[in-house]
Image: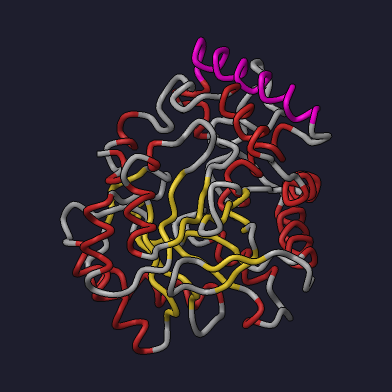
Amino acid sequence: MSTFPTRRLGATGPTTSALGLGAMGMSDLYGPADEAESIATIHAALDAGVTLIDTGDFYGMGHNELLIHEALRGVDRGSVQISVKFGAQRGPDGAWLGSDTSPAATKTALAYTLRRLRTDYVDVYRPARLDPKVPIEETVGAIAELVKAGYVRHIGLSEVGADTLRRAAAVHPISDLQIEYSLISRSLEAEVLPTARELGIGITAYGVLSRGLLSGHWAADRELAGTDFRGHSPRFQGENLTHNLALVEALRTIARSKDATVAQVAIAWVAARGEDVVPLVGARRRERLAEALGALRVRLTPEDLAAVESAVPAGAARGDRYAAAQMAFLDSER
């Protein structure tokens, strides 16, 4: 466990494992999941040396936090960093209703999170999306009060743009920005990433395999459960999918030359973007976790990186990363 590489989340954030585990798919949005296997996967991650677990209070409407609590029974709380997103509003049918990151809602959400996780504090607390009705200064100010009270250790953000980063950091130090970052999702490189680095804000990168598209295991004829949002994701539709899977095959050739899998090369590419970037992998099963952890052994030389980016150039993917209604909520894309 002591040999697992670590990285720090920004200039003021915690030191975590160089690879984090995103737990969303264990409860929501990717179709049915096996709870026992999910817990076994979290245990396998901890045993391997992963210390960062990412969740959201709206993943399965609290189920994900309860699952993490169950998995962390008997685990030294100080050995694990739990990152929680909040603010997304959902109906009983799972429909997305917008965001509420007002100070009162922020504090109420944390109270429920602490109860479900059975913990006294959250390591990183962050609004899942920018709430257009609430100035970011008010949301960050409310979390800052929770930091002062000891309920939160660090403040993070998710999917916000450069201007929002600056305004938030003027209120309280921000540990990290959680944002989608993969070979086929690189829009943050133009303005958001340089601003984060200027401000000493780290990056926790989710979607490093573009929700399975870059895993090397996706098939064009794969049938999806009705609850799997990829069934409505533009990148997984028709000719877009055919085009995107051709990019994956180009990447596979490079992976073979490195004696690695497509997923491992895709994860290693994100990890190679800088020591301030911590990839989150959304493994739901132990076999997929083991494959993802193997990315840490993949060393991409400058020549390898050039080959990867030649095979999958920036902007090469077809289709937005979310449907239009969800893209509208992304301050990072404005």
Q: Could you tell me which residue is drawn at 50 percent across and 56 percent down?
A: 204
Report the magenta residues as a range.
237-257
Q: Position of residue 157 (x, y in %)?
A: 36, 60
Rendered view: 109 above or below 242: below
Check the image and name the residue furthest to the right. Answer: 259
Residue closest to the eye, 249 or 319 = 249
> Along the line of sight, which residue is nearer the eye, 229 or 303?
303
In the image, 165 versus 84, the foreground residue is 165
The residue located at (55%, 60%) in the rendering is 54
Of residue 204 and residue 189, the one placed in the foreground of this image is: 189
- In this rendering, does residue 91 appear at all? no
Query: Is residue 161 shown above or below 310?
Result: below
Judge left or right: residue 89 versus residue 308.
left
Q: Is residue 159 above or below residue 304?
A: below
Q: Main secondary structure of the magenta part?
A: helix
Residue drawn 55% across the image and 13% down it: 243
**Residue 164 location, x and y as percent?**
24, 56
Quadrant of the rendered image containing residue 173 = bottom left
Quarter holding residue 30: top right
* As drawn, 295 above or below 46: above
Q: Quadrant of the N terminus?
A: bottom right
Q: How is the image coloured?
A: secondary structure
Residue 48, how many percent across, how many down? 79, 63
User: Could you tell me residue 223's position as x and y percent?
Assistant: 64, 22
**Residue 245: in magenta span:** yes
Q: Residue furthest front?
A: 302
